[in-house]
Image: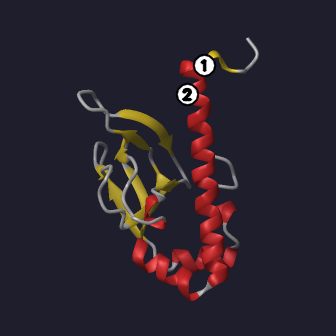
Amino acid sequence: MTSATILAAALPAEHRERLMRIAREVSFEAGTRLFEEGRRADRFWIIRTGTVTLDLHVPGRRAAVIESLGHGELVGWSWHFPPYLWQLGAEAMSPVRAYEFDADAVRALCAQDPEFGRAIAVWVGRVVAHRLHASRIRLLDLYGPHGSGGQP
């Protein structure tokens, strides 16, 4: 991820502190499913330690890993956009320690303070844009006639 998408760099200190006041520390063992595609997105996480993979259900096959996330990265953005359903699945690939946030509580804070809400929306939007760009590059590498256009 870029520094613009990592929580510590993405939010001004006062907004980051406000968000962290409602954080809950959690741990996941390797192999734990954090969420499943199509289910209700009612929370999200910021990784402290460990690795979480995002995956996509493929009928008749093993889930396809889309991306690996690590320290400081946001796990889950579907909580921010109606209909609040996970678009992918997520699994802890190693022991993970994270901060967990209740989506309803964060959305309520956003509604109460438009400046805070805008900062959260810009951060989540940057994460989504970064991940879409990374997916596009991977698709070009897999299926493009000349890869992603990098020099040979």
For mark 2, give the secondary structure: helix
Disc 1: CA contacts within 10 A as few (<14), some (14-19) or many (>=20): few
* Residue drawn at point x = 59 percent, y = 34 percent: 136
Coordinates of residue 91 in the picture (x, y in percent): 34, 45
* Up/down of 103 relative to 147, above or below: below
* Residue drawn at point x = 48 percent, y = 76 percent: 106
Coordinates of residue 143 in the picture (x, y in percent): 55, 19
Q: Amino acid at mark 2?
A: Leu
In the picture, measured across the screen, residue 97 lies left or right of residue 18, that is left
- In front of the other: 121 or 28: 121
Q: Find residue 121 and report its image quarter.
A: bottom right
In the picture, measured across the screen, residue 32 lies left or right of residue 117, that is left
Coordinates of residue 120 in the picture (x, y in percent): 60, 70
Residue 139 tag number = 2
Q: Find residue 142 and report its image quarter.
A: top right
* Up/down of 42 relative to 130, above or below: below
* Up/down of 45 relative to 144, above or below: below
- In front of the other: 3 or 146: 146
Residue 144 tag number = 1
* Residue drawn at point x = 58 percent, y = 43 percent: 132
Of all residues, the one furthest to the bottom in this rendering is 112
Q: Find residue 45 and report its image quarter.
A: bottom left
* Of pointers 2 and 1, the one earlier in the residue sequence: 2
